[in-house]
Image (spheres, grey):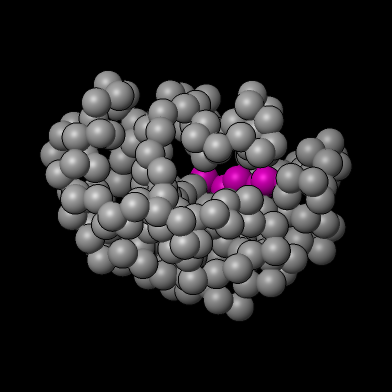
Amino acid sequence: MKVCEIFASIQGESSFAGYPCVFIRLTGCNLRCTYCDTTYAYEEGTDMEIADLVKRATAFGIDLVEVTGGEPLLQDDVHELIDRLLSAGKNVLLETNGSVSIEGIDDRVSIVLDIKTPSSGMSEKMIMGNLDHLRKKDDVKFVISDKRDYEWAIEMISSYDLYGRCNVLLSPAHGSLEPSMLSKWMVEDRSKARLNLQLHKVIYGDDARGV
């Protein structure tokens, strides 16, 4: 597999925010979101055997492991990687950009599905049928850049009954929308979603890698 980076840090997003976590960031992405903060994962990476990758991940001694990207589902061997991590007793998160089918993902995996808002420029790339495969333990994340994104996300949440399907997370796009403004909208609407800050950026700064 082509691996961009592997490191241990604090989980900055998702329903697992705040927990120590090992991150396996795979190389390659089929989208080009305007607010992407991991553009280096488009091409940058090193080929690794799955056995060696699992060995490195388990050596940290941390139970929570996230497989992310880029878009991790672009690499066919990701399913074997996930299976081996699960067999090693790890609690596995899979973060995916919503443009690749999640059908057939192991039921033991917790999925973090990113639904692209209009400001991303990629909202038409979403496979909305993915929402049918989500469970209560899974997350749907919307990155919000402005009021239009927010209203669009609220409409999507309602249309697909997302509060009844899974955890719903709203994230202010870093550098585009102040968390206080998104918080204000959510409180005014008595939202059932969770404000999802990028905790790792609060801790380590905007541009730090490997954290």
| Span colored in magenta | 164-172
Is residue 169 on the magenta stretch? yes
Left or right of residue 146, residue 37 in this image? left
Image point (57%, 51%), residue name: 38
Task: Find residue 117 and report its horizontal and vertical position in percent.
Answer: 67, 64
The picture quadrant where one finds residue 39 is bottom right
Image point (59%, 31%), residue name: 200
Q: Which is nearer the eye, 160 or 209?
A: 209
- Whether 10 is drawn above or below 179: the answer is above
The picture quadrant where one finds residue 178 is top right
The picture quadrant where one finds residue 195 is top right
- Whether 1 is drawn above or below 175: the answer is below
Left or right of residue 66, residue 31 in this image? right
Task: Find residue 113 and report its horizontal and vertical position in percent.
Answer: 48, 55
Is residue 38 on the magenta stretch? no
Task: Find residue 5 and report its horizontal and vertical position in percent.
Answer: 41, 43
Q: Which is nearer the eye, 96 or 31?
A: 31
Image point (63%, 26%), residue name: 204
Residue 37 can be seen in this image: yes
Q: Residue furthest bottom?
A: 124
